[in-house]
Amino acid sequence: MSVEPPNDDLPEDIKRDYEEASSIFNLSPRGAAALLRLGIQKLCAHLGQSGRNINTDIKELVAAGLPPKVQEALDSVRVIGNDAVHPGKIDLNDDRDTASQLFRLVNFIAQKMITEPREIDEIYSNLPAEKLQGIKDRDGDQ
């Protein structure tokens, strides 16, 4: 079974974790899930949080205006990831499914929090200067 490639906009160190998780997915879904959870911690740090406690990072990201669906994705990663890496809490029948969901969630979060804002910034920055000034004037931004 193969997984989708990492989002191109993921930072390189997170992309490496993702690719390593992908390379061991069939041999060790639990190992893949652990690497993906590490990637999520790094992704939280990339998004301006400490990266030390996913639950706290999610709370801070929500306070900063995190879209609700991204919050749900991050909480899913936190819960699924915690279950995948703590002994005694693993449902061995769901390991492959759990890891597969984590791959999808990492890319979803990257798409919403990195790719889409970058794409909008690119479009906006290409507007003519006089149109950008008109927007600033309209909004009272001088």
Image (cartoon, rainbow, N blue to C red):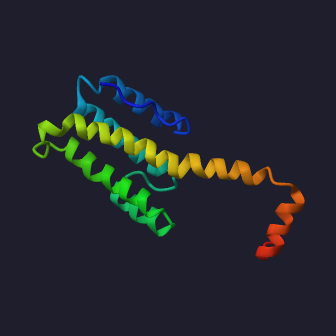
Q: Quadrant where the C terminus lies?
A: bottom right
User: Is residue 123 at all visible to an observer of this figure?
Assistant: yes
- Residue ID at (47%, 56%): 49
Q: Where on the picture, by quarter, is residue 35?
A: top left
Q: Position of residue 127 (x, y in %)?
A: 81, 54
Q: Position of residue 37 (x, y in %)?
A: 33, 43
User: Is residue 53 at all visible to an observer of this figure?
Assistant: no
Judge from the rendering whether residue 90 lies leftward or rightward of residue 134; answer left or right.
Answer: left
From this viewpoint, which residue is outermost toward the left?
88
Judge from the rendering whether residue 87 lies leftward or rightward of residue 10; answer left or right.
Answer: left
In this view, the residue in front, 34 or 23, is: 23
- Residue ID at (40%, 33%): 18
Q: Quadrant where the N terminus lies?
A: top left
Q: Where on the picture, by quarter, is residue 103?
A: top left
Q: Is residue 26 above or below residue 102?
A: above
Q: Where on the picture, by quarter, is residue 132?
A: bottom right
- Residue ID at (33%, 42%): 102
In this view, the residue in front, 6 or 86, is: 6
